[in-house]
Image: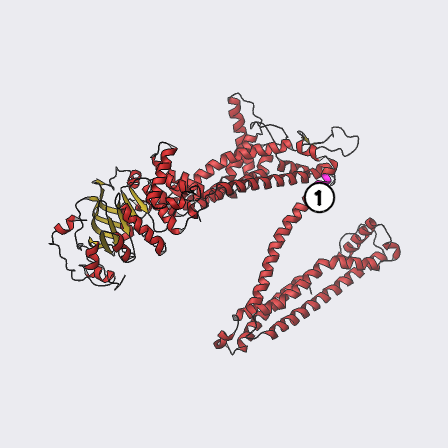
Amino acid sequence: MTTAESAASEAELPVPKAGVSIGSRPLDDDFKTVGNVRVNDARMSCTDVNVFYGEKHAIKHVDLDIGKNQVIAMIGPSGCGKSTFLRCLNRMNDTIDVCRVSGAIALDGQDIYDKKLDVVPLRAQVGMVFQKPNPFPKSIYDNIAYGPRIHGLAASRVELDEIVERSLTKAGLWDEVKDRLDQPGTGLSGGQQQRLCIARTIAVEPEVILMDEPCSALDPIATAKVEELIDELRENYTIAIVTHSMQQAARVSQRTAYFHLGHLVEVGETTEIFTNPRHKLTEDYITGRFG
Amino acid sequence: MQTPILILVLLGLMAFAFHLGKTRSLATVGGRTGIRQLHSLPAYYGFYTALWAGLPALLIAGVWLFFESSVITSMVVAGLPAELRDQPPAQLGLLVNDITNLANGNIVSRAVDDQLRAAADHMNALRGIGKTALTAVALCIALGAGALAWRTIGPRMRARNRVEAIVNALLIISSLIAILTTVGIVLSVLFESFQFFHKIPLTDFLFGLEWSPQIALRADQVGASGAFGAVPLFTGTLLISVIALMVAVPIGLMSAIYLADYASPRLRSYAKPVLEVLAGVPTVVYGFFAALTLAPAIRGAGEAMGLSVSSESALAAGLVMGVMIIPFVSSLSDDVINAVPQSLRDASYALGATRSETIRQVILPAALPGIMGGILLAASRAIGETMIVVMAAGLSANMTINPLDSVTTVTVQIVTLLVGDQEFDSAKTLAAFALGLLLFIVTLGLNIVALHIVRKYREQYE
């Protein structure tokens, strides 16, 4: 996938710096991420991103590219900041009063934290799927039609019907729900609800889809379906997924980023990270020594 | 022993029994170290003993106090000389009253003779016996029941379950009291209304267009035709309530939306209590504000525009009532809007919805049942409100939907019907019950309709 990875300069220190150890001991503030944070065809590009919750420094100097049409998985122990980082990418953190973001995050070269940029079209371009399925308490049809309606994507009822069918088909839910589109989305099973939420997100044709632990509330069969879906969506969309399951990260992603206490410790090709981690913390985490 | 003292003594006994029961439960298992062998915590054994020591005795005392006067009176009457006893019931009642007054040392309406004196002494003697007997019986029962309960205490006795059963019974009795009171009120209104409908036909009352509840006290009185058509009253009530809701619903809902979704938490923590103070202002204060400030202002404004406005107008009453019920709408709506899960807001924002789209299309539909509840509460306050209308809208039962006219409402008429001297079985007085019944039915109907609407349109989020 990332052709840049092989061409990356190996000048960076692959060896952990002194003072880094297992467990919760913080890394130095000037810590440099191991691995190549940049890719050739980046859809989103983050430079020196810092997030503060009041006094708490939650994300520390993170540089990261998110490559076009690939899945990047963000892993790390609880509280490491991976979800916070994900929520920066479509400015969902704006809804939290005490949260402050600095640094630059660009979508297709446009800084999304630019004062002049309107957050509403941004979120239509960068959609999000949440940890817990959160369908609107409306009919299945209205759940999907909600986004297209508010953005005026359909000129007629027929077009709207098409969008709904297309989105549900892409999310692999159409055959299961086509006979009961007028029934409440909250009446579906957990796995179906989550696929409904994914369908709702792709109905507004975003470029990037952020997924915050999308399978953590689902059973293994539903999880398998959603993972399959993520793999299919990669053709048309760029996906960033936060997950607690390393198997899931290994199954669905092409690149993996390992976060630790607000630092982006290591990033690289998924196969590379899981077979040959270069940083001690990454190795400890994926071999299950802590986390 | 005086009754209050007896009750205090019983309470003291209960406290003592609690202590004894607790101590004994611990003693049966050899002190605190054996506490795990007890079925229940020691305090439950204490409560168990205390309840047995107190409740039966208090119950006996309560029953006696309830029947005391009728029992003693009938015994006194039975002891009267035959010539006094064989009177018509009304005369006998007066005599008994005098005996009671004499026994209590109050003023007596007839000359005190020996017979009367003897009867009063008899009554006092009976009361004394009654008190002593009650004290003795109550204390014996308290001690006996308490001792029995105390003796049964042992590690295997399930004190917690028994105490909880008693508490359960108390809870059931409390809720029964509330329910039975409601049923009693409805039944009494119902029966009085039936009496009214014997005098005035139901159709005249329901469909009559004129309200002028004058009944002749004497047959030859002038201007005493009496018309009991409830329609003008209900149009008046409806007119004022609609005006009030037209003020309260938009303002209340919008302020709720602002407080819940736009205001900073700090501002919200100040603004919400201040808004709720509006509900705490006595209605009579709103009433004179409406009558002395707003009604003249409306009349002045109307005259400036060349309209004829009566000095007491439905508009003035409705507007002020609307302000009064804003907090019912805003406070309840604010609570339910806040209760809509953040995940639904996130879902909407993540699709690129603006804040107002999110509120209109996601939050309000999800919060609809609660908002309707608030509006209903406000509406029933508006329909039942009396003071503001008395002061600001007048008493004349005009059949109109012109808000600049003076109108009157059902509740105001109920007040005027029952104020002052009148026979209790005249149509005029009984009309109040009929109005009350009709008002009750109308509000009940409104509630049912609203509930139905809510059930149909609600978007249930969990």
The magenta stretch spans residue B193: yes
Residue located farthest toward the front when viewing the structure as drawn = A175
**Amino acid type, mark 1:** Phe
The structure's colour scheme is: secondary structure
Magenta segment, which residues? B191-196
Seen in the image, is B205 located left or right of residue A37? right
Residue located farthest toward the bottom when viewing the structure as drawn = B30
Residue A81 position, x and y percent, is 27, 53
- Residue B153 in view here: yes
Residue B307 position, x and y percent, is 54, 22
- Residue B421 in view here: no
Quadrant where the C terminus of chain A is found in the figure: bottom left
Seen in the image, is B62 located left or right of residue B313? right
Q: How many marks?
A: 1
- The residue that appears at 49% across and 43% down in the rendered structure is B369
Residue that numbered label 1 is attached to: B191
The magenta stretch spans residue B97: no
Q: Magenta region, mostly helix, strand or loop?
A: helix
Q: Nearer the viewer, residue B326 or A204?
A: A204
Disc 1: host chain: B
- The residue that appears at 38% across and 45% down in the rendered structure is A175
Q: Nearer the viewer, residue A209 or B366?
A: A209
Image quadrant where residue A183 sits: top left
Residue A186 position, x and y percent, is 42, 47
- The residue that appears at 72% across and 34% down in the rendered structure is B201
